Structure formats: C-alpha cells, structure tokens
Image (tube, rainbow, N blue to C red):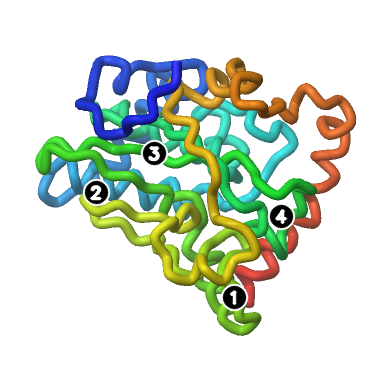
Amino acid sequence: MAEKNNDLPPSEADLLATHYIDHHHPDIVSLAKEIIKQSKSNSSTEHAILIHNYVRDSILFGWNGRFWNETASELLNSRRGYCHTKSSLFAALLRAVNIPCRVQFVDINSQILDGLLDPRTTYVLHTYTDVFNTEQNRWCHVDSYIVDNALVSAAKEKLVQENKVIGYGIHRDGQSEWNGVDNTFIQYVTDSALNQKLERPLSKHVYGYFTDIGAFYTAADQHGIQDPLTNRLLKWIFPLLIIPANRAAQHLRKQ
C-alpha cells in the first residue's frame, strides 16, 4: 500500500527485508559491516553517509538488461544501476545496520536522461529514499546516491556549456554530497529556480512509498502506469538500447 506522507514516524516495516531489498543476504550483511568499519565516530549518521557514498561511487550509474528487476544483492554483481536498483541497494545496506528507511516513488521529466537514453515518453518513474536519522529524530529525503561523482562532474560541465537544466542523468542544481541530515537530490531537485526554464514541469505525480520496486509495479495499474517488463517488444529491445547509453555515460566520465 502506498503512503504519501513521508514524514510519518518509522515503523517495523522500515527495517524489514523484501524481495528486492534483501538485506539478510550474506553479501549485503558482509558488505554493510565492511563499510561501517571505516567509521571514526561510530554514529549512525556517519554510517549512513558511508553507505551513501559507497552506493554512489561503487555502483556506476547506468542500466543492465534486467531493467528494474534486480535485487540489491544481485546489483553487487552487475555493478551498474539507476534509481530503482541503486535505491534497493541503498535501502538494503541501511537496514542491514538498523537504519530505518523507505523507498518513495514519483515521476520525473524524462529529459533528465537526454544525452544518454531516450525513453520515448515525457515522464519516467523515479525512486528516492527516505532515511531516518535517529540522532536528529528526523527523516532525510535523498537521491544523491544515484549518479556516481565522476559522471556528475562531467555532466554538470556539459549542462552549463549547453545552457540546459537537466540531462546526462542529473539536474544542474543537484548535489551528490550528502551530510546525513539535509534533504539532498541529484535528480529530483524540485525547489530549483532553474526549473522555470524547463519545457514541462520536473515532476507531476507523487505516488508515495511502497515496500519495494516490485510492490510498486504490482499496483502500477492503479496509477495508470504500465510495467515496462510486460511489454515484450521493449523487454527484447531494451538490452540493445542501453549499450550506447552506458557507452555515452562512460565517455563522459573520461572527459
């Protein structure tokens, strides 16, 4: 069931394992322990930041042939993901160290992917994560872990050169550095003054939070959204479309 109030207090559900957020998987448990070993203060805020930075930079922004149908533990093998799959991994690692979190679903202007991929639709589904900071007793809303810093840096330069607001996977006013407390977005930057220059709004729909990406698509018909994996043609063609998209992202990183 979706919930659109993303500031409700954390509940047991915010620490549960799901099919896609499989935080009990041995690889997830082991990795989470390794990541937080780097912590100097042993605070949950620092743990969340370390996990955020791992997901951001160790999993390159991009796509693989399974599209959204990939669990957090499977993403550790493919090493390339976008908002849905990287959100599953981010949530799994957080929950593995007992940090409550929720996965939120909204739509976003598809021009954010200009220069990488043409989804042939005006809006695409987007995922971000609500992280509960127990030390501050507040929710933080973030998607700053989605695009790796190497791509963020190059993409921002391109957007400035081309005088564009969004494209290459990012928003020009987006931020990829998170302090563990503030709301921080690299894509879903709804409060930017630059959004006035967009041909259409950055986002039109807030769907609320679901237990994971699979749960969202199970109820997608309620929102007038079709699961792209039910489209046989797209399912066949998608692995071909992502090859140039991933190449374009890699080319940008090397500039």
Three-letter code for the amino acid on which mark 1 is drawn: Leu
N-terminal label among 4 and 3: 3
Q: Image quadrant of residue 78?
A: top right
- Tag on residue 129? 3
C-alpha gap between disc 2 and disc 1: 34 Å
N-terminal label among 2 and 3: 2
- Tag 2, which secondary structure? loop
**What residue did someone put label 1 on?**
159
Nearer to us of marks 4 and 3 is 3
Three-letter code for the amino acid on which mark 3 is drawn: Thr
Nearer to us of marks 2 and 1 is 1
Is 179 left or right of 90, judged from the image as shown?
A: left
- Tag 3, which secondary structure? strand
Instruction: Tally the numbered discs.
Output: 4
N-terminal label among 2 and 4: 2
C-alpha gap between disc 2 and disc 4: 31 Å
**What residue did someone put label 2 on?**
38
C-alpha gap between disc 2 and disc 3: 23 Å
Residue 232 x %, y %: 86, 25
Three-letter code for the amino acid on which mark 2 is drawn: Gln
Give yes or no for contact between labels 2 and 4 (Cβ–Cβ under 8 Å): no
Viewer-side residue, 93 vs 143: 143
Residue 202 x %, y %: 55, 55
Nearer to us of marks 2 and 3 is 3
